């Protein structure tokens, strides 16, 4: 079992097409929420809650912080990235919609046990921070989501710098950087493939969806 981070900071509404598909409004600054360390799970195990409505996949670029950051600049943020990977921000969509309609926080929909599923980490030294990343999620052989870091509203260094104005980031902390369009419900026994690519380098991970209880 990997060492747990102190927190997982997530970014919402960072891709224009995803904002549109959920009829949301683009934020004037990064939209942040936090998952507890107990939300962490690791591929290939993907567990969705039973009897709480649809659980949607949201595939995202994940970064792991290597040094403490507080009120840092984007340049400092870029240098502090220890590793990259992919994550699934699992979301109880009906629960989230009800909470949003009532003006309540989203934790019940976003921060449950197992709601942050991570791939293995790729050391930052294996990637070029100046080149875009491409990523995708395939479910049962059909591609559902695909995105590029170049399509983000806020870049990864800008996101980390903004987060550090509010929350001190500690070594090992995880940042999920937002999901592209194509979110949809998962079902038990779905077969998942997550792919990350930069130039001619590529990585892939697989998983199987299970239902708890």
Image: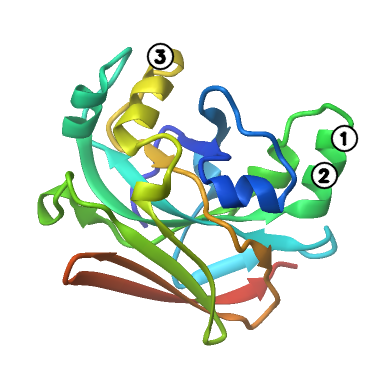
* Nearer to us in this view, 112 or 204: 204
Q: CA distance from mark 1 to mark 3?
A: 29 Å
In the displayed structure, does residue 170 sit left or right of residue 96?
left
In this rendering, the answer to whether 143 lies above or below 79 is: below
* Nearer to us in this view, 102 or 3: 102
Asked which quadrant contains residue 167, the reply is top left
Report the residue at 31% width, 38% height from top.
Answer: 172
Helix, strand or loop at mark 3: helix
Q: Quadrant of the N terminus?
A: bottom left
Q: Give how far across and how far down residue 9 sits, in percent.
A: 48, 34
Q: Give how far across and how far down residue 36 sits, in percent.
A: 54, 37
* Nearer to us in this view, 15 or 52: 15
- Tag 1 residue: 101
In this rendering, the answer to whether 166 lies above or below 8 is: above
In the displayed structure, does residue 149 sit left or right of residue 138?
left
Q: Give how far across and how far down residue 58 sits, in percent.
A: 57, 57
Q: Earlier in the sequence, mark 3 or mark 2?
A: 2
Q: CA distance from mark 3 to mark 2?
A: 29 Å
Residues marked 2 and 1 touching at CB (< 8 Å): yes
- Tag 2 residue: 97
Q: Which mark is residue 133?
A: none
Classed neighbour count for the residue bearing mark 1: other residues with Cα under 10 Å, few (<14), some (14–19), many (≥20): few
- Tag 3 residue: 165
């Amino acid at each position: 079992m990997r060492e747990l981070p102190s927190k997982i900071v997530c970014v919402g509404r960072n891709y224009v097409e995803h904002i549109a598909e959920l009829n949301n409004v683009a934020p004037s600054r990064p939209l942040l929420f936090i998952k507890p360390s107990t939300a962490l799970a690791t591929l290939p195990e993907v567990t969705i809650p039973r009897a709480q409505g649809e659980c949607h996949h949201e595939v995202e670029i994940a970064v792991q912080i290597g040094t403490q950051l507080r009120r840092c600049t984007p340049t400092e943020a870029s240098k502090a990235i220890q590793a990259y990977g992919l994550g699934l921000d699992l979301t109880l969509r009906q629960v989230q919609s009800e909470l949003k309609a009532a003006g309540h926080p989203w934790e019940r929909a976003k921060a449950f046990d197992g709601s942050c599923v991570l791939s293995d980490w790729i050391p930052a030294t294996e990637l070029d921070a100046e080149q875009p990343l491409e990523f995708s999620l395939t479910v049962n052989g059909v591609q559902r989501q695909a995105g590029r870091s170049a399509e983000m509203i806020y870049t990864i260094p800008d996101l980390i710098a903004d987060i550090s104005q509010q929350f001190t980031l500690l070594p090992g902390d995880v940042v999920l950087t937002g999901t592209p369009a194509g979110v949809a419900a998962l079902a038990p026994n779905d077969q998942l493939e997550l792919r990350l690519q930069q130039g001619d380098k590529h990585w892939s991970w697989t998983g199987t969806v299970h239902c708890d209880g």
